[in-house]
Amino acid sequence: MEVYLLRHGIAEDRAESGKDADRRLTDEGRAKLRGVLERAHSAEVRPTLILSSPLRRALETAEIAAHQLGYEGKIVRTPALAPESSPQDVWNTIREHGEQDSILLAGHEPLFSATMAHFLGSTRAMVQFRKGALARIDFNVLGSVAVGALQWMITAKLA
């Protein structure tokens, strides 16, 4: 299975409501995210499922990804991708969708750096997951322990 971790793009500092969950992507965040996703599209990234954190900036990121990558399915919101979640919760959610060939996850930091480390067998975060970055990790087995192989990572600066 191919798993794509997509950190949300640059978001406003403060939502009108004052709630962190309501923060929206900025125009700059949308533009940089589109650049990363154009590169992903040319690399033939075609998710069969998109899962997103329920927070607005992640949902907006997932919607842009769906549009840019030609995904026509429903974006599924899951608390496993909320900022306070854990890498094991993310892995358990992926395993629940084991019939999929390719899953894109839209979420947050520091969860994604910790999740990438967990998926690659490290006990500590070793990657700085920038806003709008996309990483691909492949899994041959969806066992109770995540054992993946990093294929690539695209940042807005590279796109």
Image (spheres, rainbow, N blue to C red):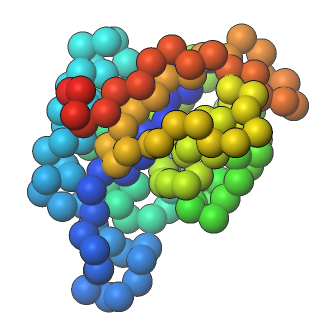
User: In the rendered view, does 87 fall on the left or right side of 145?
Assistant: left
- Percent across and percent down for residue 33 are 24, 41
Q: Quadrant of residue 73?
A: top left
Numbered circles on residues, count: 0
Q: Quadrant of residue 90?
A: top right
Q: Quadrant of the C terminus?
A: top left
Q: Quadrant of residue 110?
A: bottom right
Visible residue check, residue 71: no
Task: Out of 39 and 129, give the one closest to the viewer.
Answer: 129
Q: Residue at point 46% right, 28% down?
A: 135
Task: Out of 63 and 151, give the one closest to the viewer.
Answer: 151
User: In the rendered view, does 69 fall on the left or right side of 136?
Assistant: left
Q: Is residue 39 above or below residue 81?
A: above
User: In the rendered view, does 4 fall on the left or right side of 36?
Assistant: right
Q: Is residue 127 above or below residue 63?
A: above
Q: Is residue 44 above or below residue 37?
A: above
- Percent across and percent down for residue 57 are 35, 60
Q: Residue at point 48% right, 54% down?
A: 108
- Percent across and percent down for residue 13 are 28, 74
Q: Residue at point 22% right, 34% down?
A: 157
Visible residue check, residue 154: yes
